[in-house]
Amino acid sequence: MAAGASGRGAALIVDDRWHPGIGDPTAIGWITVFFYVAAAVLCGAAARRDSSRAPPPRFWEGLAAILLLLAVNKQLDLQSLLTQVVRDWTKAHGWYERRRELQAAFIFAVAAIGFAALLVVPSIIRRQEMPRRIALAGLIFLYCFILVRASSFHHVDWALGVTLLSVRVNWLLEIGGIVIVALGALLVMLRRVAAR
């Protein structure tokens, strides 16, 4: 680890600055990337097998693309770059001293948007079949998790670092969201097998 490197995204954050590299070279980091890629492959397979004619027409392809981007982000740690850009901007504009208030407001806004999405999206896609709804719920969960993690709020970082039976809550939440998306795709494939 380089001098001044942080434990979060160790090789990427040096002297509090983001640098390109592998953000989570641990076994669980690569396992999480595997889960993202496997879920993306399942979504791609579901796209070929989904008989639903309801919009959006490229639902599963879109989810596959998002999951692949998240797999790349997992190792490039782009949320740390975003955090750095926002930190630099708040310092330049004199808001950095109020960062705790801003971080709390950000987390509240993310949670509110996620909760509103969970309430509104089902009514928007009412005609969608259950597998799409499940996958979308998983995606919304991942959205909230990733944005809250990116907020770099100390108490949230602490909570995500808590371990239950040697498993970090952070890992459970991220992989759990991916599994929910994959479950929706898997249901499409199982339905096609059962229909044969």
Image: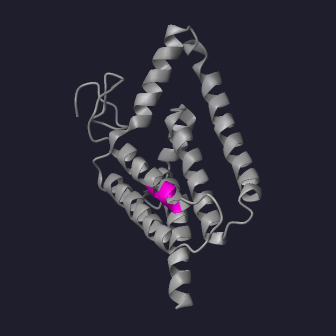
Q: Is residue 179 left or right of residue 35?
A: right
Q: Is residue 66 visible?
A: yes
Vertical comparison of 101 with 49: above or below: above
- Residue drawn at x 67%, y 29% as measured from the top left: 105
Figure quadrant of residue 134 = bottom right
In this rendered view, identify the residue nearer to me: 9 or 92.
Answer: 92
- What colouring does the structure picture have? one colour
In this rendered view, identify the residue nearer to me: 185 or 25.
Answer: 185
- Residue drawn at x 51%, y 46% as measured from the top left: 160
The location of residue 181, given as percent across then percent down, is 53, 62
Seen as rendered, the residue at the extreme left is: 2
Q: Is residue 9 left or right of residue 178?
A: left
- Residue drawn at x 54%, y 75% as measured from the top left: 188
Vertical comparison of 14 with 180: above or below: above
The location of residue 62, given as percent across then percent down, is 50, 54
The location of residue 34, given as percent across then percent down, is 35, 60
Q: Is residue 89 left or right of residue 98?
A: left
Magenta stretch: give its range. 60-64
Secondary structure mostly seen in the magenta stretch? helix
What quarter of the picture does the N terminus occupy?
A: top left
Q: Is residue 172 visible?
A: no
Q: How many marks?
A: 0
Vertical comparison of 143 with 12: above or below: below
The location of residue 30, given as percent across then percent down, is 31, 55
Seen as rendered, the residue at the extreme bottom is: 196
189 drawn magenta? no
In this rendered view, identify the residue nearer to me: 165 or 189.
Answer: 189
Figure quadrant of residue 100 = top right
